Image (cartoon, helix red, strand yellow):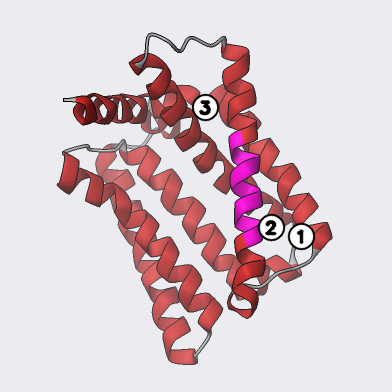
Amino acid sequence: MTIADTLGLSDSQERVIVRVLQGVLFGFLVFGLTTGQLSMTITSGIALGVTLFPAILRREYGYAMDAGLVLWITIAMILHTAGSLSLYSQYQWYDEVTHTVSATIVAGIGYASFRALELHSDAIDVPSEFRTIFIVVFVLAMGIFWEILEFALGGLITVYGVDDIVTDMIFNTVGALIVAIWGTGYVGSLVGFFRERLRSTES
């Protein structure tokens, strides 16, 4: 099962959409640089780098990530970057949607890593219920790390206060549960890639 099957798009169509969205992120980066908006520059630069990571994996390891998954990552990054245009402060629902979408990406990576380790080692055999708990805990841990990073960076990234952190954690949990209940099948190829990397490190 792939995201392409769900969306009804071909790989080529998904790649075109990804390129367009990457162009938008590059536009945000140029805008931030030319207007001296440091927060926008940093956010868009990181987001653009994340969207290019699948291409790096393909070049370095020969792993072609599902185009739908690349699209999903890119959508998450552009939602987050667009929030820098005062959308976070103007619309509470936008922040909630963005955190939910971003949390699904983190949850997918966390699950794929854990499942690959489980399949790799005969000593690890956990029930599916524990995998669900792991996904939620992993996403919340990453969420806490991100909130600490925001405070550490001070004025470079906008911090909205304790109430916002609580809301972020709630919708991070929503995103984690979405993946735990419905989304683990979409990262099957990523599980396989991580498992192959574990094998290669032992050889």
Please name the residue shown 29% across and 47% down the image.
Answer: 54
As helix, strand or loop, the secondary structure at mark 1 comes to: helix
Q: Quadrant of residue 120?
A: top left
Residue 38 in the image, given as x and y percentages of width and height? 52, 82
Ranked by sequence position, the earlier of labels 3 and 2 is 2
Quick one: which residue is furthest to the bottom in this view? 35
Name the residue beneath numbered marker 3: 183
Q: Are marks 1 and 2 in contact (CB under 8 Å)?
A: yes
- What residue range appears in magenta? 138-148
Name the residue beneath numbered marker 2: 95
Is 39 part of what is drawn in magenta?
no
Q: Quadrant of residue 83?
A: bottom right
Comparing 155 with 5, the one in front is 155
Q: Amino acid at mark 2?
A: Asp
Quadrant occupied by the C terminus: top left
Comparing 1 with 167, the one in front is 167
Q: Is residue 1 visible?
A: no
Quick one: which residue is furthest to the right in this view? 163
Name the residue beneath numbered marker 1: 92
